[in-house]
Amino acid sequence: MKWNRRKLIDRIMSFLTAACVVVAIIPLLSILYTVTINGISAINLDFLTQLPKPEGEVGGGLGNAIQGTFIVVGIACLIGLPVGILAGVYLSEYGENRFGRMVSFVADVLAGTPSIAAGIFGYTFIVLYFGFSAIAGGAALSVLMIPIVARTTEESLRLVSGSLREASLALGIPRWKTILHIVLSTAMSGIITGALLAIARVSGETAPLLLTAFGNPYWAAGINKPISTMPVQIYTYAIAPFPDWHAKAWGGALVLIILVLILNIGVRFITRKKY
Amino acid sequence: MQNKITVETLNAWFGTNHALKNINLSFQENRITAIIGPSGCGKSTFIRCLNRMHEVVRGAKVSGKVLVDGKDIYERDIDPVDIRRCIGMVFQKPNPFPTMSIYDNVAAGLKLNGMKDKKILDKTVEESLKKAALWDEVKNDLNKSGVSLSGGQQQRLCIARALAVEPEIILFDEPCSALDPISTSRIEDLMIELKEKYTIVIVTHNMQQAARVSDYTAFFLYGELIEFGETNQIFKKPKEKSTEDYIVGRFG
Amino acid sequence: MDRPKFRLSKLSGDLIFKTVVGLFAFGIIVLAFLLFRELFIASSLSRNAFGAGFLTTSTWDPVKEVFGALPFIFGTLVSSLLALLIAVPLSLGIAIFLSELAPEKLRTPLSFIIELLAAVPSVIIGLWGIFILAPFIRDYLAPPLSTYLGFLPLFQGPMYGPSMLTGGVILAIMVIPITSSVSKEVIMTVPIQQREAALALGATGWETTRIAVIPYARSGIFGAVILGFGRAVGETMAVTMVIGNSPHISASLFSPSYTMASVIANEFLETAASKLYISSLIEVGFLLLVVSVIINIAARILVWKLLKVERGAA
Ligand SMILES: Nc1ncnc2c1ncn2[C@@H]1O[C@H](COP(=O)(O)OP(=O)(O)O)[C@@H](O)[C@H]1O
Ligand SMILES: [Mg+2]
């Protein structure tokens, strides 16, 4: 084959593969653009602080859904972060055995389970006994968080160099204190990154909350009561036939996407600087 | 002068790799003993057996006795943590704790073992840094990160950190191999000062260094102790052919 | 020396610590087990009532309490395959561009932007799907398809917006980030010697990719595709919002459909009255769980091994 022709093919392929990137970025840009444009006109102070109004009445907002999302995600963190982080510590520090490998394997598989399955689990495991509630929602979300947090914790801890562990052990510091005070604090930024990404991931989850937290037109009344959350509220508004509610769905989407993107982008900047 | 450490028929393995074979050796109190030998001959493995750091490696095994003041540190039911508090170690690459300040690095050993008294901590930190000849350089920056120091200062910080837990023996594993000549000579001077109070074992691949600082020298080859004696004798009149070959540079 | 030098080891903090973190690790296994057990038990009513016929019958009639999951299995399979059809070539192109052909400076920011797509909550993608994507497909994509390919049963009948086609496209958008980023990682594990050998022969960048890189990374890329399939199968909200939610099997991509995940999300809360109805929905969920576990195990075997080995060696 002539060199020129081969060079031309090389150019064409570079162009085609670059075009793939552009095609994939278009939906993202379109989503960001439409959410911003449609959302911004819906957002005002009332929108962020008021209760929703029934269809037909003007005004009202997502205040309780914002509150509810923080509560439910908070509960998910209370359950998911300690379990995930400590399990990750085991995997990294003591996990070089059959049991450890089995746990990582199960964690990987669990990380791939559909979120709706976690919702059903929350329903049969908690809702059936205690009713729709913030706690059921948090529990369902924690099922999604635990494997992510465990694996990212494990990976961050493995990055801590062996020489630091040895330095600490050689000072006569017991292994468990070495792990707790030296290894964990050295890996802290990685662990926080993993935790924040897991939080970002579950903050936008809708399906599990439909089946567990349900919804509530009022302010949160306790963690054992149904609770409104942003994703579920956006869903409710989006599929309703009222234009006014659609506007509210966009407003909610803007709030939620800002939250999630701040977590994602912020995290990457933190880690970029650290390493 | 008495024997601080006595090693009897010490053997060590990494999995099936027999890294140390039947080592018998004694170290005298308040003396510096150098361990020399080509790379891979088991020097590091040997000194890591002296403070039970060898067993930290997966699949590593030890047999034999290491008597410290007459008591076997490998005796059943002895907590290796206590051994390591009594026998400090300084590693090849300076490894201060990166998230800790200079002060906390030095205080780490005490703090993490439950010492809370601020006065004692302050005093120990100052004394240890002075002993490590670092105090004058860092006394105004105790809250700066330990990794902000230069390589030579970091290594002296690691020495101070080891001194702070009040060991009786200090093991140095090629402490200067990552340092420039000026830092190296400071650390050598420091070791000579330290031997007043401590028993020192230093692994080095640098024969001039062994000749400069040590009182006794042990030559290792392929996991075996080939020759041991006063440093003068080893360097001037080695008994073994292979020692001589190594010293005149006929090995790697 | 006044302190006792070598104490006998006490009940060790190490043992306690290891036991505690070990219990939490065990908690992950317990969690996975419970997840399975709960879904299995809660679907037993439906399994006893319909047996294996649940998988092969297409009647879904809450009034008569006759339930067969075939329309949902069909909808999930077809929409996911459609998504792969669109996403796999794009993902491969992205992976090759970002790992082999793109200028060094662009690689990290572009990868980051593509991965950002994975971070957008699916309910927001669904919202965008309802109001932007579905009308777009109805107005600009469907008419030419029916004009030029209308002789195929795939593109016949009216198109209102929510449809199998829209569902497939939205799933493709959600599959691209994972398939492309895993493919990219796999491609980057190809040893440098492999590339250099080809480059030394005077191959161009693309030729090197085609001759030396792709063949080497083939099984890992296949794993990435399977991971994407898993993502598509399990995805719920975005699809629910654009696929039309109608339990009918149709050859046309223009007609509305229903997936396993969306029938659960959509009908679960309407069913408080009937135990059998809920149990049938949970059985759909159980099937979904089993399928995604199988998919993930397969992908893990294909991808993780490769990445682990390479990382371990590095
Ligand atoms: N962590 C380890 N795992 C397995 N083998 C090791 C390890 N460290 C050292 N070895 C082996 O033990 C032998 C002695 O090594 P070492 O004591 O480090 O030598 P030196 O310090 O004299 O260079 C070598 O053959 C080396 O390959
Ligand atoms: Mg060595």
Image (tube, rainbow, N blue to C red):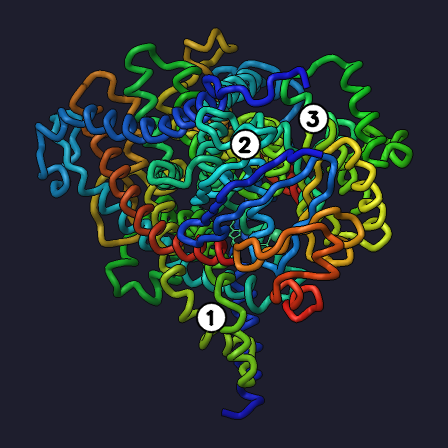
Percent coordinates x, y for residue C206 in the rendering:
52, 75
Label 2: chain? A
Q: Helix, strand or loop at disc 3?
A: loop
Q: Which residue is mark 2?
A: A195
Q: Residue at x 36, y 62 (%)?
A: C219
The furthest residue to the top: A221
| Amino acid on which disc 3 is placed | Val
Label 3: chain? B
| Amino acid on which disc 2 is placed | Ala
Q: Helix, strand or loop at disc 1?
A: helix
User: Which residue is nearer to you in this view: C220 or A256?
Assistant: C220
Q: Residue at x 58, y 18 (%)?
A: A59
Q: Helix, strand or loop at disc 2?
A: helix
In front: label 3 or label 1: 3
User: Which residue is nearer to you in this view: C310 or B65?
Assistant: B65
Percent coordinates x, y for residue C31 in the rendering:
33, 27
Q: Which mark is residue C213?
A: 1
Rendered position, A55 above or below C136: above
* Alpha carbon distance from label 3 to label 1: 55 Å
Task: Give the left or right position of residue B19, taking residue B162 as reference.
Answer: left
> Quadrant location of residue C32?
top left
In front: label 2 or label 3: 3
Q: Are marks 2 and 3 on the same chain?
A: no
Percent coordinates x, y for residue B104 in the rendering:
74, 27
Q: Which mark is residue A274?
A: none
Q: Badge 3, how many Cα within 10 Å: few under 14, some, many 20+?
A: many
Rendered position, A13 above or below C307: below
Q: Which residue is mark 3?
A: B165
Circles 2 and 1 in contact, beta carbons < 8 Å: no
| Amino acid on which disc 1 is placed | Val
Q: Is the CB–ligand 1 distance for label 2 below 8 Å?
A: no
